[in-house]
Amino acid sequence: MVSSSSTNADVNDIRQVALRWTTAVAAADVQQLGRLMTDDIVVIHGNGRIISGREAVMADFERSFADVRVDQQVESEETIVAGDWAFDRGSICTTVTPRAAGEVKQWNSRTLTILRKEGAGPWRVARVIGVVKQPGVK
């Protein structure tokens, strides 16, 4: 679903950010992830953990990627663009594979990603809220 206030170009650009994000996650490319974030990014995980600021989020990714490989599939369900801000609601299927021995884990999350466009620059991820989907909940 796309809001009537959204332009096709903006929505396409926002979907490309999601694609570049999941590609960077799969490649464990922390530098690319950093380029896709605002300086003041805030990530709120489903367990309540909050990480604030580009450097802290990048460091968190770096620590995680040392231990696991992460693959994600994103499905956008609604995108609303309001000026220099955009809201993308969707779902993510995440598979985490340990680099050493261990159990592969997979879960589905619902997410709200808020993006910001600064001037003529690209859309960047400013806020992410993720909630793990519980079995049996629609």
Image (spheres, rainbow, N blue to C red):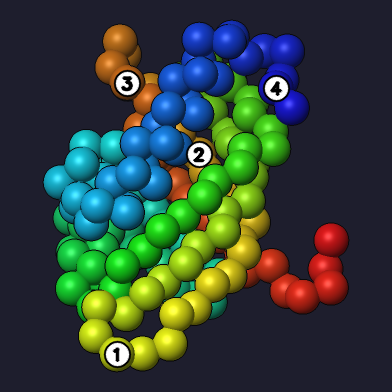
Q: Nearer the viewer, mark 2 or mark 4?
A: 4
Residue 103 seen in the current view: yes
Q: Earlier in the sequence, mark 2 or mark 3?
A: 2
Residue at 55% over, 20% down: 11
Question: Which label belongs to residue 2?
Answer: 4
Q: Earlier in the sequence, mark 4 or mark 3?
A: 4
Q: Earlier in the sequence, mark 1 or mark 2?
A: 1
Q: In the image, what residue type sits under mark 4?
A: Val
Q: In the image, what residue type sits under mark 3?
A: Pro
Cβ–Cβ under 8 Å for marks 3 and 1: no
Q: Dot 3, crowdedness within 10 Å: few (<14), some or many (≥20)?
A: some
Question: Which label belongs to residue 85?
Answer: none
Q: Secondary structure under badge 4? A: loop
Residue that mark 1 sits on: 101
Residue that mark 3 sits on: 122
- Tell me the distance, in whole angstroms, between the alpha carbons under discs 4 and 3: 19 Å
